[in-house]
Image: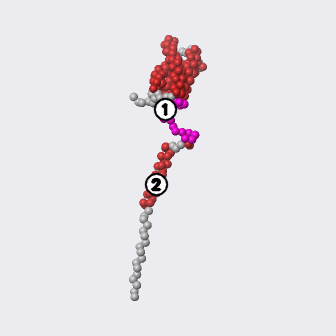
Amino acid sequence: MIEIIPNWHPIFVHFTIGLLATCAALFIVSALLPSHRWNETALKAAHINLWVGAGVTVATVLAGLYAYNTVAHDGPSHAAMTDHKNWALPTAGLWIGLALWSGYAVRKSGWRRGWVFVLLVLVAGSALAATGFKGGEAVYRHGLGVMALPEVEGDGGHGSHSHGGADHHETDDHHEEDDHHHDEAEAEPAAVAPAPEAEVPRTP
């Protein structure tokens, strides 16, 4: 199995958020535009996103519980991930309940939706947003699941540190310039010393 740090939770949770947020948006659009020609298509897509998202959410919760019990942490980060877990479990339960209700309703009466159902989707969407925010706080504010943090210099902007790619190119340019000068030095002929003048013998 491919090693994911800290585990598979960061992968599954993005599918959960993406699918369920899309589902909520489509249910709201279909409720606001009941006579639009795309209404039935939006409803079908909303239900399917809900079913798939709820299925992925089961894997997300299991992987999240594994991370909660295995990831290295300190006191403040423990409080942050506990807060995240306390929001995540009831939020996941609400979405899974909506998915079961949706499947039963579609099987019984077709691709429809009632206002009570849409209001519950809005509540579940708000809880999902709050849970996702708290999960982001645990990672980005407390460093949970992060193997290494950057050593920030100055203000932490692009101008406060060196860039590996730029430095590499600059080094290559210096090497090419040195090689060019070396080749020029080899190409220049060595200076030939003038031959000494022959000494003319003196006659007595």
Instruction: Mark yes or no: residue 157 visible.
Output: no
Q: Quadrant of the C terminus?
A: bottom left
Q: Is the magenta stretch mostly helix, strand or loop?
A: loop
Give the percent coordinates (x, y) of residue 155. 58, 40
Outermost residue on the front side: it is 75
Type of amino acid at the residue the image marks with label 1: Val
Quadrant in which residue 70 is drawn: top left
Q: In which quarter of the image is residue 29?
A: top right
* Residue 199 located left or right of residue 113: left
The location of residue 113, given as percent across then percent down, is: 55, 15
Q: Who is closer to the viewer here, 5 or 183?
A: 5
Q: Look at mark 2 in the image and give the residue it sits on.
A: 178
Q: Is residue 100 magenta?
A: no
Q: How many marks?
A: 2
- Please state which of the two labelled residues, at mark 1 or mark 2, is closer to the viewer: 1
Q: Quadrant of the N terminus?
A: top left
Q: Can residue 173 be seen in this view?
A: yes
How far apart, in angstroms, are the residues tagged by discs 1 and 2? 42 Å
The residue identified by callout 1 is: 146
As drawn, the residue found furthest toward the bottom would be: 204
| Magenta region, residue range | 138-158
- Kind of residue indicated by mark 2: Asp
Q: Does 110 sit left or right of 203 as displayed?
A: right
Color scheme of the displayed model: secondary structure
Residue pictured at 41% horizontal, 75% vertical? 196
Look at 43% across and 67% down and name the residue there.
Answer: 191
